[in-house]
């Protein structure tokens, strides 16, 4: 994920401002990390450079069903 996307990203639940935490970066791109909304106390993962901005209840339901939390990198059908 490019850090400059922070200018247009908002919390999908409350439309609040998101704070970026970088765990791993490569060539200026965020590879692993998270986006945090202080307004509703939700955290959204960034996995393989892809921010998962699904609402928390939908994300948890998908994880419970065994679906990956984020789309698999390179899986285009």
Image (cartoon, rainbow, N blue to C red):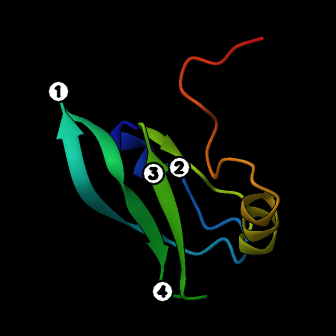
Q: Which labelled disc corresponds to residue 77?
A: none
- Residue that carries the numbered disc 4 in the rendered image: 38
Labels 4 and 3 touching (C-beta < 8 A):
no
Q: Which mark is in front, 4 or 1?
A: 1
Which residue shows up at 41% across the image and 37% down it?
Answer: 49
Image quadrant where residue 54 sits:
bottom right
- Residue 39, percent across and down? 55, 88
Q: Tag count in the figure?
A: 4
Q: Is residue 47 left or right of residue 55?
A: left
Q: Which mark is in front, 4 or 3?
A: 3
Q: Residues within 10 Å of mark 3 (few under 14, many from 20)?
A: many
Q: Is residue 13 left or right of residue 28?
A: right
Q: Does label 4 or label 3 sit earlier along the sequence?
A: 4
- Residue 12, percent across and down? 70, 65
Tell me how far mark 2 sits from mark 1, CA to CA: 21 Å
- Residue that carries the numbered disc 3 in the rendered image: 46
Residue at disc 4, secondary structure: loop
Residue at disc 1, secondary structure: loop
């Amino acid at each position: 994920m490019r850090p400059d996307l922070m200018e247009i990203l908002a919390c999908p639940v409350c439309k609040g401002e998101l704070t970026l935490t970088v765990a791993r970066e490569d060539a200026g791109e965020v590879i692993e990390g998270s986006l945090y909304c202080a307004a509703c106390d939700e955290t959204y993962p960034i996995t393989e450079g892809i921010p998962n901005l699904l609402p928390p209840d939908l994300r948890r339901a998908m994880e419970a069903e065994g679906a990956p939390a984020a789309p698999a990198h390179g899986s285009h059908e």
